[in-house]
Image: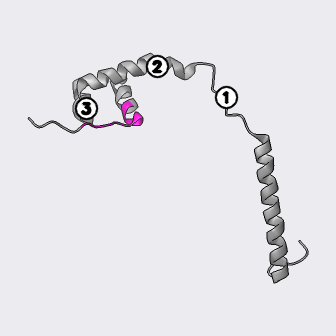
Amino acid sequence: MKRRPRRNHSPAFKSKVALAAIKGEQTVAELAQRFDVHPNQITQWKTLLLERAARVFEGGETAPPPVDVKQLHAKIGELTLENDFLEGALTKAGVLSARR
């Protein structure tokens, strides 16, 4: 019997299959046939989802990474300098009116 090449399923696919198993509208065997996955794999994904479901509602949300204000000010200065340079060059070329 020829072995099938190893497949890597996306997290979205795994959650879709696990949720279908949790709903219980179809048996694991029916889901395995529908999604072309081994029944043991569906059971593992279902168990994993149930074990980790509580983490979704945990209070400690991760804080966004700290913002480097000095780097942002440097970038603002750099962009202001470029804008001033381009404004002067375009004004001299007659493309941009002198009064804005």
The quadrant of the image that shows the N terminus is: top left
Residue 65: give x, y in percent of width and height.
67, 34
Is residue 43 a member of the stretch shown in magenta? no
Residue where numbered disc 2 is placed: 52
Q: Cβ–Cβ below 8 Å for labels 2 and 1?
A: no
Q: Residues within 10 Å of mark 2 (few under 14, many from 20)?
A: few
Give the residue pinned by disc 3.
37
Number of marks drawn = 3
> How far is mark 3 from mark 1, CA to CA?
37 Å
Three-letter code, disc 3: Val
> Mark 3 touching mark 2, by CB under 8 A?
no
Neighbours of disc 3 within 10 Å: few (<14), some (14-19), many (20+) = some
* For residue 5, side relative to residue 12 (left or right): left
Which mark is first along the chain, 1 or 3? 3
Residue span colored magenta: 6-14
Q: Position of residue 39 (x, y in %)?
A: 24, 24
Dot 3 or dot 2, earlier in sequence: 3
Front one among 48 and 72:
72
Q: Mark 3: which secondary structure?
A: loop
Res 21 → quadrant? top left
Residue at numbered disc 1: 63
Name the mark on residue 97: none
Mark 2 or mark 1: name the one nearer the start of the chain: 2
Direction from residue 15 to residue 34 in the image, left or right: left
Q: In the current view of this chain or complex, which residue is farthest to the right?
A: 99
The x, y position of residue 46, in whole percent, is 36, 22
